[in-house]
Amino acid sequence: MSRDIQLKERWEKVVEILSNQFAEGEQLDLDAIIYLIGVQELGKFKSIFAKDEKVNLMHIAICQLLVPYGYYEFDFVDKDGWPHYIVKEELPQLKAGEQSILMKDAIVNYFIEKELID
């Protein structure tokens, strides 16, 4: 099976599982899934987040998702429990479609590691 087809199938499985669990079957988009990963990484599941905190949650998720690719490294957790990362390597300039593929690949790998999918 080609890598593109495998990524597409795994991505669709992640979307299906998360949409059923968090959106009553309504299909979640890439940003919503990144947000959920940020909440997971923060570990504060019952909190109400302000708009700027939601942006920070997405940043946490993106950093965590790109750690295995060598772009970020976990640094520390602050006194409020928020993780911080340092840039190890600047992200290359990618077109929107390329960014989407990178993030979908990173999300699929994240959920393979978390044993949500195989």
Image: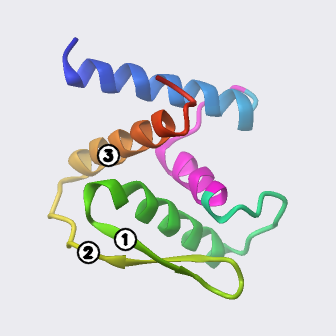
Residue lying furthest top in this view?
A: 1
Residue at (46, 43) in percent of width and height: 110
Q: Is the Cβ of the residue at disc 2 closer than 8 Å to that at disc 1?
A: yes
Res 116 → quadrant: top right
The magenta region covers 25-40
Res 21 label: none
For label 1, the crowd category at 10 Å Cα-Cα, with few meaning under 14, some 14 to 19 and many 20 or more, is: some
Query: Label 2 is placed on what type of residue?
Result: Lys
Percent x, y of residue 66: 35, 58
Q: Is the Cβ of the residue at disc 2 closer than 8 Å to that at disc 3?
A: no
Query: Number of callouts in the render?
Result: 3
Secondary structure under the numbered disc 3 in the rendered image: helix
Q: Earlier in the sequence, mark 2 or mark 3?
A: 2
Mark 3 to mark 1: distance in Å? 21 Å
Q: Earlier in the sequence, mark 3 or mark 1?
A: 1
Percent x, y of residue 113: 47, 39
User: Which residue matches tag 3?
Assistant: 100
Percent x, y of residue 108: 42, 36
User: Which residue matches tag 1?
Assistant: 73
User: Which residue matches tag 2?
Assistant: 88
Please name whichever residue, 89 or 34, is drawn nearer the observer in this view of the structure: 89
Query: Label 1 is placed on what type of residue?
Result: Glu
Percent x, y of residue 87: 30, 77
For label 2, the crowd category at 10 Å Cα-Cα, with few meaning under 14, some 14 to 19 and many 20 or more, is: few
